[in-house]
């Protein structure tokens, strides 16, 4: 089997043609040449319907996901397409502790059209009959920002037994860390703005499926709804994908080191990272994740302590995204997550481990309480 690094570097690239660019640029065109009467309509005829640069990226991501990939303008556009596609057929079951905008979209935009929205926690038992009449179950694992883990194979079996589809938001794990389709999911969804593109310069998302009919419906929904990525964004994401294997390895190692360091500090509580042997999610995560992720969470005493931590750090940026080259931290309550005021989602970057751990320890030491 071809290794992760090889697939990341070579994904989407063909054998090449004599004199052809080794690194072809994005196809920046909104229209394409059409023939005359009687000529077949080419694959590319209008920029909202398809683009060669999308297809190159889709081929690379689809290979990693183990399915057919459809790229979207953002992670939320990808999730929205899945929720709208499934919502016409029954109730939606969403994580109560997952990304807040997915819940907001379901309740505020689909709910008024009669779509029933039910919420369940990522970890723990689901309420009885929650799957009755459900069309789709959405998991987010590891969850954002809680870093809880759901058993994908068990959820897929339960959803399918009830006649529902299963979608897994795989943003935190990445396709290298976890392969939901192989575990029984019908959709693997991700915000490629995060670790997949990895450089903080792209907003993009994708959905991968094994069912060609589902892929066709997603492409149709993308074109009709206009949730299409720009060719430049797709090209940048493909360029960034080439180093995902390297970046994820460094980020996961840094996350492990930071998690161990913050757990030793008296002002830190509730450290969560699925790679920690004592983490409540470790057993399930170890069973279904191929590699660990670079995102952890911990809680400081209050909002003021978070501010002191960020002000004292030289390497940790206050930012609300994750998965980039530079380490960042985000106080999640500010966005409306139902968490403690001092809960920090920490995205470990690609700095040298020694430098990052020393900086985090120094920043923690600056907290006066």
Image (cartoon, helix red, strand yellow):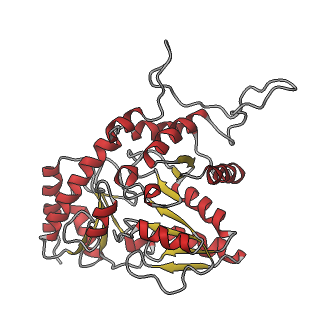
Query: Residue placed at 29% from the left, 56% from the top?
Result: 294
Task: Answer with the quarter of the image where residue 105 lies.
Answer: bottom right
Query: Residue placed at 62% from the left, 47% from the top?
Result: 228
Task: Answer with the quarter of the image where residue 221 lies.
Answer: bottom right
Left or right of 53 on screen, residue 252: left
User: In the picture, which quadrant includes the C terminus?
Assistant: bottom left
Query: Residue placed at 60% from the left, 71% from the top?
Result: 163
Q: Residue furthest top?
A: 19
Task: Answer with the quarter of the image where residue 38 lies.
Answer: top right
Q: Residue furthest right?
A: 37
Image position, residue 301 (x, y; %): 24, 79
Image position, residue 224 (x, y; %): 72, 52
Image position, residue 315 (x, y; %): 23, 53
Left or right of 254 on screen, residue 34: right
- Whether residue 123 appears in this view of the structure is yes
Q: Residue furthest bottom?
A: 128
- Whether residue 307 appears in this view of the structure is no
- Seen from the viewer's position, the closer of residues 39 and 243 is 39
Image position, residue 11 (x, y; %): 44, 35
- Seen from the viewer's position, the closer of residues 210 and 40 is 210
- Does residue 231 sit above or below 129 in this rendering? above
- Does residue 230 sit above or below 274 in this rendering? above
- Does residue 343 sit above or below 6 in this rendering? below
User: In the picture, which quadrant includes the N terminus?
Assistant: top left
Q: Please give the count of numbered marks on the rendered protein.
A: 0
Query: Residue placed at 70% from the left, 78% from the top?
Result: 114
- Seen from the viewer's position, the closer of residues 41 and 313 is 41
Left or right of 220 on screen, residue 2: left
């Amino acid at each position: 089997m071809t290794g992760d690094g090889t697939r990341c570097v070579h994904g989407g690239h063909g054998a090449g043609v004599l004199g052809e660019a080794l690194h072809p640029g994005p196809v920046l065109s909104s229209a394409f040449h059409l023939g005359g009467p009687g000529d077949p309509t080419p694959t590319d005829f209008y920029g909202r319907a398809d683009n060669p640069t999308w297809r190159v990226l889709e081929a690379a991501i689809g290979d990693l996901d183990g399915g057919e990939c459809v790229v979207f303008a953002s992670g939320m556009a990808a999730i929205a397409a899945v929720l709208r596609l499934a919502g016409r057929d029954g109730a939606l079951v969403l994580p109560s502790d997952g990304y807040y905008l997915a819940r907001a979209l379901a309740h505020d935009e689909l709910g008024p059209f009669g779509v029933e929205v039910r919420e369940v926690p990522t970890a723990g038992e689901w309420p009885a009959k929650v799957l009755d009449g459900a069309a789709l179950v959405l998991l987010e694992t590891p969850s954002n920002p809680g870093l809880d883990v759901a058993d994908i194979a068990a959820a897929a079996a339960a959803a399918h037994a009830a006649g529902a589809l299963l979608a897994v938001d795989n943003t935190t794990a990445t396709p290298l860390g976890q392969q939901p389709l192989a575990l029984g999911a019908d959709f693997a969804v991700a915000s490629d703005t995060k670790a997949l593109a990895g450089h903080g310069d792209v907003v993009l998302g994708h959905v991968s499926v094994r069912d060609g009919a589902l892929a066709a419906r997603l492409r149709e929904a993308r074109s009709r709804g206009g949730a299409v990525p720009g060719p430049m964004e797709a090209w940048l994401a493909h360029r960034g994908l080439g180093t995902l294997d390297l970046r994820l390895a460094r980020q996961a190692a840094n996350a492990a080191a930071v998690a161990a360091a913050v757990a030793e500090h008296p002002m830190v509580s509730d450290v969560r990272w699925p790679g920690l042997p004592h983490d409540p999610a470790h057993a399930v995560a170890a069973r279904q994740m191929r590699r660990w992720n670079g995102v952890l969470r911990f809680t400081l005493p209050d909002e003021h302590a978070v501010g002191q931590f960020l002000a004292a750090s030289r390497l940790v940026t206050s930012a609300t995204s994750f998965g980039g080259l530079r380490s960042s931290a985000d106080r999640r309550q500010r966005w409306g997550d139902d968490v403690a005021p001092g809960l920090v989602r920490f995205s470990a970057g690609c700095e040298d481990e020694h430098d990052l751990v020393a900086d985090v320890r120094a920043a923690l030491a600056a907290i006066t309480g």
